[in-house]
Every structure is written in C-alpha cells, then in structure tokens.
Image: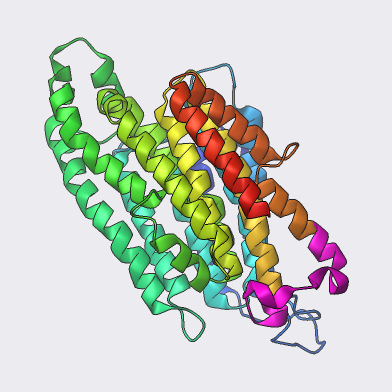
Amino acid sequence: MLFFLLDPNNTVVSLLVVLILLTMLAFLIPNGVLSNESHNPDSLTNDGYYSITKSYCLFVTMVPLIWSLYLWASFDAVGHSLQMVVTLERLHISFGVDSVSLSLTILTTALFPICIMLMRTFKGYITFLLLEIVIYGALNVLDLLGFYILFEASLILLFLLIGRTPYGNIEAAYKIILYTMAGSLVLLPIIFVLYALGGSTSLIYLMCNFGSQGEGIWFLLPERQMILGWGLFIVFAVKIPLMPVHLWLPEAHVAAPTAGSVLLAGVLLKLGGIGFIRFMIPILPTFTASIFPLVCCMCLASFLFSTLSTIRQIDLKKIVAYSSIGHMAMITLAIFTMSEYSAYNATFMMVAHGLVSPCLFLLVGLLYDRFHTKFVLYFTGLGAHMPIFSIFFFLCTLANLSFPLFPNFIAEFLCLTSIFSVHSLYASNLHYHQYLLDKLYFY
C-alpha cells in the first residue's frame, strides 16, 4: 500500500486523497483536553491547554509537509518540465508537478502547521485543513476548469475566515469576493469557449494542439488569442493583484486573523503568478507578448502607488499589505518578460516573499495579541521592552526592503536581470524608483 501511494505515477493524487480522508476524520474526534491545567482563553499560546482536535489537525498538516519533501527528492531537475503526471480519465482531469508548483507546494505545506498553531477554534482548524486541500489541488492541477473551481473554493473558505463574527469584517469579506468574482465571471465564458473550440480545458491537450502543425491549431490563431487572453489576464491580475484591482488586499489583511494573513501573503497571492506561468503563457504566447508594454506600465504604476501608500499608512498590517503589492508587481513583470529564466526568477521571488511577508504578519499578530492595537505610533520605544522581538522585526523589515544578503535582495536582482534582458529602459526605471522609495521608506 505504501509503495502504491509513493509511486511517482500516483503520488500527487495520493497525497490529495490522503489529505481529504484525514480531514474527514477530524469531524469524528472529540474536542477534549490533554492537560488539566488552567486554560487562559486570552493567551496566544494557551499554556497548559491543548485540544485533541488541534493536536490531530497539526499532525494532519505535517503529513503533506513530509510528503512534499518526498516529491522534492523524487523530482528530476534536468528532466521534463512536467513530471509525476496523473490523469483521472473518468473525471477528465490531470495533476502534475513542475518546478514552480513544487516550490510553492513546499512553501504551502510549511506554512499550514504555523496557521494551525495560531488558530483556537474547531471551525478554524477545519477551515484551514480544507484550505490546504483546495490550494494543494490548485497548485498541481493541469486543467484550467479545475484550477478555476479549486481557486473559487478557496475564496469561499477565505470569506468565512474574514467575515467571521464578532472579530471579522463582513465588508472586507464582501469586497474580496466582489473583486475576485468579477474577474471569475470574465474567465468562465473564456473556459467554455476553449472547451467548445478545443474539446478540452486540459493544459496538456491545449499545449499539444498549439504545438502541432495540423488543422487543430485553428482555434488558437493570434486573433482568437487576443479575445481569449483578456479573460485570463483580468482574472489573474485581480488575484495577484495589480493596480487598479488591488484594493481588496489591504482590507482583507486587516480583517483576517493572523493565520489568515500568513496564508494570504504566503500562498494565495502566488496563485495568480502560477496562473500566468502555467496557463496563460503556454496557451496564449502571442497575446502575452503583445500586451507586454501595457503590463510594464501597470506593474510600474502598482509599484509606485503601493510604495507611496505604504509610507503614509499608520496600520502595521496595511504597511505590510501594501508592500506586498509592490513585490507582486515585480514578479508579474519578470514573468511577462518571457526570457530564458523568467519563470524561475519569478518563482524565487515568490518563495522569498512567501517567507518574509508571513513572518512580518506573524510578528504584527503577536504585537496585536499583547497590545490590542496595530497603530504604529503606539509602539514607540518598543525595543526597550521587547528587545529580542524588535531585533527579529528589524531583520524581517530589512528583508522586506530587499537589503543585501537577504533572500528578497537575491530574488529582486534575478527579476531585474530578466527585465534587463528584454528592455533596459523599463528595468532602469523600476530599479531607480525602487532604490529611491526604499530609502524614503526606511527613513
């Protein structure tokens, strides 16, 4: 049985099935306690109190983490870009792993145990386990309709997480749903058109048809690519997000619990990037190349606006949230250069941002748990009372500013390398404004 689950021909789907079964078992476990010591509900760590459900859910999140390390060990870096492909013929859907999805899968499975440790309710545990299922599926699915369904399922769970009472913000929850739903309503007819013309929404099938020289290439002519491409671009631009469809992100971060902000910054924003890399560029390369000047202007505007907005914020969560928009703009610009290593450089940036930004949200959450405010002016002289915390916060801030020797510096250098290889003017402009605004932000 174990050899069957770990077989490269089955292991991607096996992990998904095992995770679903383990999540279903969580409903059968009583929410008891393993310690008879007193329970303080106001404590973040809940010393002396560990529910059986929380312990079990933490164990469940460790299973995909170990499994993803096995996927990493089994992945052939010099082999085909798509590996461990599993096709479910009855469902007409395929799953597979490439270098981008593998990196984000390891990052996702590493963040979920932290999210479970931050949650305190049974509903929160189950919500995050279900989120892990749909996000893992979205990262590894090789079907555009399957990606659409799995991502929209994650938005439903995110709505429940942000719109919770009495601590949530139902207005912010509706804002994220309305923004993403508007993009999804544009994408859905595009998926139906692709299926009607090509007979499938499978990435493998569409790539094979596009690369063939037969008569099957007619439905992906440049004229049709321009029509279909705008639907894909709009939905992924909302999800990543780019200006002017970025306003849902700061509100979602402020209203979400600490675990929700960690997950949103670490994983959910990256689904737009993997959508560009996996679906848009292989299926619609002509459209992707034709809108490169427009994407450059949008990314530069997003970078400038988000950085200037970051400087004037007084809420710590909004400061980190607006800085994330600038980082995602650079990732998008690196992806659309379509240079030799643009996908790998953008992936490195996504992983670096997925490590640093959740750390900042975690530190802000620890501050809020103790002081019940995120107003930055109230934390004057914090280093005298919390020196170790202040050192960690300072180091994470330097990493977020892309200070040398931090992963964000290396990632942004690689992204700028991709941009310079295509258009030196765009890269010089972006680098100049980044340097100037980072200096102002640090001051």
Q: Residue 379, percent across and down?
A: 72, 74
Residue at 46%, 79% in the rendered image: 164
Which quadrant holds the C terminus?
bottom right
Q: Is residue 410 above or below residue 314?
A: above
Residue at 56%, 52% in the rendered image: 266
Our reading of the magenta stretch's main secondary structure is helix
Residue at 73%, 37% in the rendered image: 404
Q: Which residues, given as a range, are shown in magenta?
A: 368-391
Let me know if residue 359 appears in the view. yes
Quadrant of residue 371 within the rendered picture: bottom right
Q: Residue 260, percent across and down?
A: 54, 65
Residue 165 included in the magenta stretch of the image: no
Judged left or right of residue 397, residue 14 is: left
Q: Residue 18, percent across and down?
A: 53, 51
Let me know if residue 106 appears in the view. no
Q: Is residue 30 above or below residue 114?
A: below
Judged left or right of residue 262, residue 145 is: left
State how many labels appear.
0
Residue 379 included in the magenta stretch of the image: yes
Task: Pick whichever, 84 or 416, lies toward us.
Answer: 416
Task: Pick whichever, 159 or 326, lies toward us.
Answer: 326
Judged left or right of residue 149, residue 79 is: right
Task: Pick whichever, 434 or 27, lies toward us.
Answer: 434
What color scheme is it?
Answer: rainbow
Which quadrant holds the N terminus?
top right
Residue at 39%, 63% in the rendered image: 248
Q: Residue 53, percent across and down?
A: 63, 73
